[in-house]
Image (cartoon, rainbow, N blue to C red):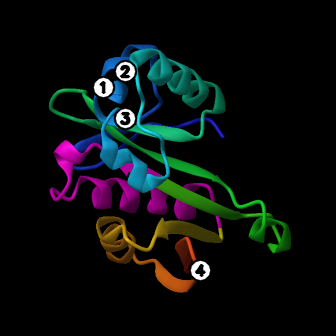
Amino acid sequence: MSIKTLETERLVLRGWRLDDVDDLYEYAKKPSMAMGGWEPHANKSISLRALREFIEEDDRWAVALKTSGKAIGQVRLYPDENRGRFSERNSAYLINYALSEDYWGKGYMTEAVKRVVVYAFEELKIELLGVFTSHHNVRSKRVIERCGFQYEGANEHSAMYSILRRK
C-alpha cells in the first residue's frame, strides 16, 4: 500500500518525510507515549531511526495540521495477520494511532481516524478494521467509540474493538 494523502477539515494525513524528525521527536519523547506501548524517545537519533522505518514501511500517515504543516501524530493501517487469513479476500486490517499530548482533547485524532476508516472501506474495500487499546487509555477508547468501532473483548493487557464495512 502506498500512502495516499488524505484531508479533513483541519488536517492533512500524508506520508512521513525526513524533515518531520523534529516534530516526531517533540511528541515521541514525552512519557505519555508509553500509554500507547511506545518507549519515549531518549534522543532525536531514535526518532530519526523510527522515521526512516515509517517511510520504508509506507503504512502510516503523519497527521499534520493544515494551518502549519506540523506533524502532531500518526495513524497506521496494516493487515491483520490473524483474522485476515480467514477473510475471503484477506481484507481484515488493524489501525493504530498516536497523538502529541499537546493536542489531546481537541478532536484531532477522532477526525483523522474517521477519515482513514472511510478511506479503508470505500477506496481499499477492506471488510473489517480492528483496533486495540490498553484498558487504562480512556482517551483512546473515546476515539474508538466515536469512530463507530464496537467492543469485542479483552485480555489482561488490552481491549479489542472492530468495525465492519457496510455493503
Q: Pointers 1 and 2 in contact (CB under 8 A)?
A: yes
Residue that label 1 marks: 23
Label 4 and label 2: CA atoms lie apart by 38 Å
Give the residue type that dot 1 points to.
Answer: Asp
For the residue labelled by badge 1, is the local secondary structure a helix, a strand or a loop?
helix
Q: Secondary structure at mark 3?
A: helix
Real-space Cα separation, disc 1 to disc 4, in angstroms: 39 Å
Question: Which residue bears the numbered disc 2?
Answer: 20
Quadrant in which residue 89 is drawn: bottom right
Instruction: Read off the residue under disc 3.
Output: 28
- Left/right placement of residue 40 relative to residue 78 reads left
Q: What residue do we see at 30% from left, 25% from top?
A: 23
**Exactly how many numbered labels are in the figure?**
4
Quadrant of the frame with the C terminus: bottom right
Q: Are the residues flagged by discs 2 and 3 in contact, CB closer than 8 Å? A: no
Q: Amino acid at mark 2?
A: Asp
> What type is the residue that disc 3 sits on?
Ala
Q: Position of residue 9 (x, y in %)?
A: 21, 49
Residue 99 visible: no
- Please tell me whether the stretch drawn in magenta is mainly helix, strand or loop: helix
Q: Between disc 2 and disc 3, whose residue precedes? A: 2
Classify 10 Å Cα crowding around label 1: few (below 14), some (14-19), many (20 and above).
Answer: some
The residue range painted magenta reads 97-126
Label 4 SS: loop
* Circle nearer the N terminus (1, 4): 1
On the image, numbered disc 4 is attached to which residue? 167
